Amino acid sequence: MILKAFRNGLGSLIAGVDCLTRPAKKQRSPEDQAQVDAAAASLSLYQFHACPFCIKVRRVLHTLNVPVALHDVNKSPAAELELTQKGGKRQVPCLRIKESDGSERWLYESKAIIQYLETRFGD
């Protein structure tokens, strides 16, 4: 119980520092940003607000200026159920990628997610 409270407090502190120290968003032409926005519509990030690895992914999303739907698994039982049933495990961060053929890919691990985002949106 004490460890959980400590972990949540530390995570909230890290999240607060992240908000204060985020770099500027990537600037694109309106046409290019519209393409990024359209591509990002097929992405969803399942995360915890105070998870350091989730913060790391959200920071990259902010820097690349990629608007992705966020689902907090701790606050939404529906998001948790979807993550475990479709993704296969309750691990965050997890990026759900809806492919053009209607299939879904569930990408776990912050390093893999960041690599995917930088490759797809880093220009």
Image (spheres, rainbow, N blue to C red):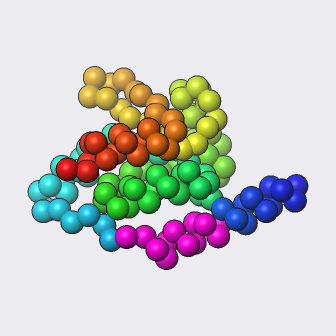
Residue shown at the point (57%, 34%) measured from the top left: 83
| Percent coordinates x, y for residue 67 in the rendering | 35, 55
Residue shown at the point (53%, 57%) measured from the top left: 55
Magenta residue span: 12-23
> Which image quadrant is residue 59 in?
bottom left
| Percent coordinates x, y for residue 95 in the rendering | 45, 40
Q: Nearer the viewer, residue 48 or 38?
A: 48
| Percent coordinates x, y for residue 63 in the rendering | 35, 62
Determine whether, in the image, residue 63 is placed left or right of residue 19. left
Determine whether, in the image, residue 21 is placed left or right of residue 120. right
Q: Nearer the viewer, residue 53 or 100?
A: 53
| Percent coordinates x, y for residue 62 in the rendering | 38, 61
65 above or below 44? below
Residue shown at the point (42%, 50%) measured from the top left: 69
Residue shown at the point (34%, 45%) measured from the top left: 117
> Which is the main secondary structure of the residues drawn in magenta?
helix
Residue 44 makes an appearance in the image: no
Q: Does the magenta-highlighted stretch encompass residue 98?
A: no
115 above or below 122? above
The quarter in which the N terminus is drawn is bottom right
The single residue placed furthest to the bottom in the displayed view is 20
Residue 14 makes an appearance in the image: yes
54 above or below 88? below
Determine whether, in the image, residue 118 is placed left or right of residue 70. left
35 above or below 89? below
Count of labels shown? 0
Q: Nearer the viewer, residue 120 or 43?
A: 120
Determine whether, in the image, residue 4 is placed left or right of residue 34. right
